[in-house]
Amino acid sequence: MMKQEYLADKCRYENGMEYERCGRSGVLLPKVSLGFWHNFGSVDPYERSREITHYAFDHGITHFDLANNYGPVYGSAEETMGRLMDDDFRPYRDELFISTKAGYDMWPGPYGNWGSRKYLMASLDQSLRRMHLDYVDLFYSHRFDPSTPMEETLQALVDIVRAGKALYVGISNWPLEPMRFAHQYLKERDVPLLIYQGRLNMLDRKPQEEGILDFCAREGIGFIAFSPLAQGLLTDRYLNGIPKDSRMSKGIFLKEDMLTPQLLEQLRGYQTEAEQQGRSLAEMALRWVLQQQAVTSVLVGASSVAQLEKNLKCL
């Protein structure tokens, strides 16, 4: 059976998406970006991945965010992206802003983790092969490595850009002081730090509390928030208990003991606040993140077109 040819909506930039400048760069990112952390692996139906990405792009979502070990299994989200490029998105490559990362465990042995030059270089080469791309728009150091000299990690990022394998670089999950060093090091080598990716939501405000958002605003660095809905806690999903098919019931990223009486009371308070605004809890939570200083975009996951459609109502 032949796949139906995908033709992007001619009105895709008139369907309500808003774009925000990323720090002091020339890059505009959609306020809502699509994350491939879950739902795009080899365990997930490929046709559903097609439907979600088609809907996203047709509604102005131009930024797809991946990492080397997204799946499951590791690498399979990037392989899905490669199939999507071949089947649907090759004619639209220059309208897409595709990112990937390396920093967490990817393959066994001493060279498949953390922040060495060898790992970052090898991982990006693998990522490009899986995604059937010549380059990515953005490559991240996925986490700070306290055992590798920062100069080694950062020079690898510089050389990746100079080799034409990435147009921009970012960092994710780095503490503030190493981030200051990274910003200065990259700036001095004419490969500016484009963006910081961090966890930010109404329940977890560490980037605010630790001064990262202040630093981004002051230095002209973009910020993109992952887990803006706290893995689904900031939706109506858990207000009346733990659904059997929920992420928390599976206990992989959310544990049942996290839903304490105190947290449930807090969530129900947020729900009341959202109702007073005439919004869903998820809409209010996404809008809250987007309203914070220095925030360029929020990364949302989606297990269905309907879920993504609901999330876009935050605009």
Image (tube, rainbow, N blue to C red):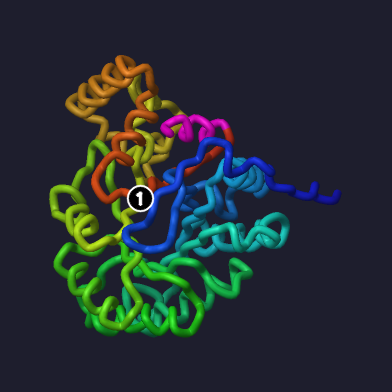
Q: Which residue sits at x=43%, y=69%?
A: 139
Q: Which residue sits at x=31%, y=83%?
A: 189
Displayed quadrant of residue 267: top left
Disc 1, SS: strand
In the displayed orientation, state which residue is furthest to the right: 1
- Is 307 colored magenta in this rendering? yes
Closer-to-camera residue (166/50)? 166
Q: Is residue 184 above or below residue 271?
A: below
52 on left or right of 230:
right
Question: Are there few (<14), some (14-19), or many (20+) residues within 10 Å of tag 1?
Answer: many
Q: Is residue 81 above or below residue 166?
A: above
Q: Position of residue 185 (x, y in %)?
A: 24, 79
Q: Could you tell me which quadrant the C terminus lies in?
A: top left
- Is 211 colored magenta in this rendering? no
The residue labelled by disc 1 is 296
Q: Which residue sits at x=42%, y=75%?
A: 108
Q: Position of residue 94 (x, y in %)?
A: 60, 63
> In the image, which residues are magenta?
306-315
Give the prevailing secondary structure in the magenta stretch.
helix
Q: Which residue sits at x=33%, y=22%?
A: 239
131 on left or right of 234:
right
Q: Is residue 115 above or below residue 284?
A: below
Does residue 19 show up? yes
Closer-to-camera residue (105/283)? 283
Q: Amino acid at mark 1?
A: Thr
Q: Position of residue 3 (x, y in %)?
A: 80, 50
Q: Is residue 14 above or below residue 222?
A: above
Q: Position of residue 191 (x, y in %)?
A: 35, 77
